[in-house]
Amino acid sequence: MHETLLSYIREHSATPLTDTEIEVIKAVFVPRQIKKRQFFLKEGEVCKYSAFIVKGAMRQYRVDDKGVEHILRLSIENWWVSDRESYIMLTPSRYYIDAWEDCELLTLTRADFLDKLSLIPAINEMAKKMDENFAIAAQRRVSSISLSAEERYAELVQTYPEFLQRFPQHLIASYLGITRETLSRLRSHAARK
Amino acid sequence: MHETLLSYIREHSATPLTDTEIEVIKAVFVPRQIKKRQFFLKEGEVCKYSAFIVKGAMRQYRVDDKGVEHILRLSIENWWVSDRESYIMLTPSRYYIDAWEDCELLTLTRADFLDKLSLIPAINEMAKKMDENFAIAAQRRVSSISLSAEERYAELVQTYPEFLQRFPQHLIASYLGITRETLSRLRSHAARK
DNA sequence: CATATTTTGTGACATAGATCATCGTTTCCC
DNA sequence: GGGAAACGATGATCTATGTCACAAAATATG
């Protein structure tokens, strides 16, 4: 189970891992299975764990006053989930995170990260690269705010084609910030051409 | 001129700076003055510098097919500017960055950062904290996509009240992803209450 | 200090996208 | 394997916001 994670770390850093380091990693990343629809984080809670998805698919969303869910992030195998703000600042989260498919996760507490993992050079290198990638993805997503619904969808198809297979349209629509009806119409227009 | 930057570094790290380190910092951060409307980065160029704003105000934006500017980021004193994607990946940028007011900058190349600055513990600590803050801000901004224009404006007033003093309404509007007319109407409605 | 430019406000109208309602189709699960 | 829930398509409206046009303030600049 930890093998997937170890490969991921190796792919995201140039520094190799020693045997001792591998032992530390296996010790701090606690496996956890969660079933579809089960919560990983609820609004108001502090996000205690960051998780690496070994298998499955998850979603992060907020719920507005009318009870409507707004998807912030969709994640699948080899991605990480957590509410970074809550995880780092230890503040109550504004978001929910739950499993969209049955998942196998490797969970990590902030304390273990700071005390044990941040002593490992390969991990720091990886963490830095992840922060950079996150920043780049976020900048792109912010930049897409000014696009039309159709353009945003086209960009998604381009960037994360896997999502279309893994998540139903109403989740994709919410991720794009539009209603499922609009997405449905969008797609039939695009197909017609 | 470097004093502002040194205070900034001290505020964002627990590790103190040695005299040698201060010399390195003064050597790699090159001062540059740029006048209002002058470009720091143009679309298609690789972003060679990251800059700390000692004085002034800048904006980062993209220009769509119709020639309309879409503001991505507004920055003032004690903030950093750069197109992170281009700066890190060395890819041509999709954005423009220019001065909205006359500015005093301290500019840093990626090579100097990697070769010289990343040997300084206080700098690494600061860089990490900045990455975290950036990630948090980005997550919030993405989360606000699903809000109405009015709610987004209210959030901006709350988060960055300084912006209202420093930038004209049409830039604020563009930053929010709405037209200047809509923002104008929004404000008169809000005031009426 | 006078004129040019930028910024802001507001009316009339256009439109992308939301909402609400209905109805097949698929897939879930007991 | 059959009923319930979830999913997706599509029509009829409604509404927030965009577009265009013009004018009044405010601000910059020779």
Image: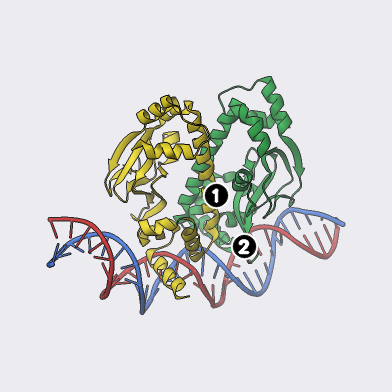
Chain colours: A green, B yellow, C blue, D red
Extreme residue in the top direction: A19
Q: What is the chain identity of the residue bearing mark 2?
A: A
User: Could one spot residue B47 in this view of the protein?
Assistant: no
Q: From the top left corner, tell me how far across and down residue A162 is, in percent.
A: 60, 44
Q: CA distance from mark 2 to mark 1?
A: 16 Å
What residue is at 58 percent from the left and 60 percent from the top? A184
Relative to B193, is A88 on the left or the right? right
Callout 2 secondary element: loop
Q: From the top left corner, tell me how far across and down residue A128 is, in percent.
A: 54, 34
Relative to A120, is B159 on the left or the right? left
What residue is at 32 percent from the left and 51 percent from the top? B100
Q: Is residue C6 above or below residue A22?
A: below
Residue topped by disc 2: A64
Badge count: 2
Check disc 1 and give the amino acid type: Gln
Q: Is residue B79 above or below residue B110?
A: below
User: Could one spot residue B14 in this view of the protein?
Assistant: yes
Q: From the top left corner, tell me how far across and down residue A42 is, in percent.
A: 69, 53
Residue topped by disc 1: B139
Relative to A20, is D19 on the left or the right? left
Callout 1 secondary element: helix
Q: Residues within 10 Å of mark 2 (few under 14, many from 20)?
A: few
